[in-house]
Image (cartoon, helix red, strand yellow):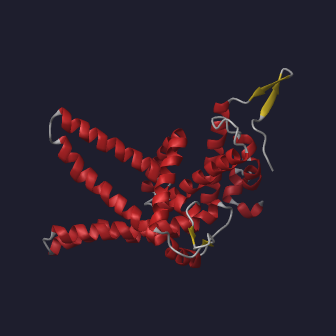
Amino acid sequence: MKLPLYPKSQQSGSSTYINLNVIIFFMIGFFIRKSFYDLWDNMFRIVLLNLGFIALAAIPILVPRLISLFIDSQALEIIFVALGILLCSVYLSTASYTIKSISDYGSFGFSDFIRNIKKAWSAGLVMGFFVFLLFIILFVVMPFYMGFESILGLVLGAVVFWTMVFGLLSCQYYFSVCARLINQTDSDGTPINDKTLSGRNLIKAFKKCMLVLLDNSGFSFFLMLHNIVVLLISVVLAFLFPGPAGILLYADEALRLRLLKYDWLEANPDADRRKIPWDALLIEEREKTGTRTFKNFIFPWKD
């Protein structure tokens, strides 16, 4: 079905465009509501995924400290930090591939997670190297430049800092982009759903992340701030809920909704991309998501 170019409202007998800011806030409000519903409905699965991540996170956080008590080897500590970061990243990549089904109004089981490891491990390793690079930048490169105590050092430090911010804003979509937009194909172009991503496809994933950021900069800043708040709430709840898995779900929900915009723009190539009719695009999504009362959350079986 081809949606209208722009939804209109009737005021005083004349047609006027709906205020764009209202439409944008409408989309953000729906994103928060749907994400929360999906998070609540799958709380047990989210907690289990977070428990797995917490167990793996002990490798880069606790193991180096234990090693330092018995062996005075900084190199060995760095190796375990790097290994732990890579393992955690592969785990998060696999979780993102698995959580995608929740955003699509489905569910998943343990077998789905195991099956997704084969598809997600390469994307996870690449992100693990990226995180380790950020670690080096924060604790080695930035202090080095700031130690110059000159205008040159300040400028170089500022360039590194804002480059890192751009990378963080872009890469918040990375796992979801790999799971949703990057497909491995065989020689005749047929999708292969059970194989890992190639190096070329991983490069495409980073490019798509940057394009999504540049085309949705305001929403990307909102998503980053939103996820920081979710992270702070997770600290209070010992990262069990919403935790890393919850943040992955929010990122996937965000990308999934943005893709509705691109589907509409593809169907309406002459449309103004600054005027997206979110109220029309989300009609089917609103019907699937529905609304709930506080009683529905606490006693869902009484619906």
Position of the C terminus, as image quadrant, is bottom right
Q: Is residue 197 left or right of residue 136?
A: right
Q: Inspect this view and state whether residue 65 appears.
A: no
Q: Is residue 292 left or right of residue 78?
A: right
Residue 148's place in the image compared with 52, above or below, is above
Q: Is residue 20 left or right of residue 202?
A: right
Q: Inspect this view and state whether residue 204 appears.
A: yes
Residue 163's place in the image compared with 155, above or below, is below
Residue lying farthest top? 12
Residue 303's place in the image compared with 273, above or below, is below
Tell me what residue is drawn at x 58 percent, y 79 percent.
111
Residue 174's place in the image compared with 31, above or below, is below
| Rendered location of residue 200, percent (x, y) | 47, 64
| Rendered location of residue 108, percent (x, y) | 62, 71
Tell me what residue is drawn at x 72 percent, y 54 percent.
289
| Rendered location of residue 18, percent (x, y) | 73, 30
| Rendered location of residue 73, percent (x, y) | 15, 71
The quarter holding residue 61 reads bottom left
Residue sitting nearer the eye, 154 or 59: 154
Q: Number of labelled discs?
A: 0
Residue sitting nearer the eye, 51 or 202: 202
Residue lying farthest right? 13
Tell me what residue is drawn at x 45 percent, y 59 percent.
203
Residue lying farthest front? 188
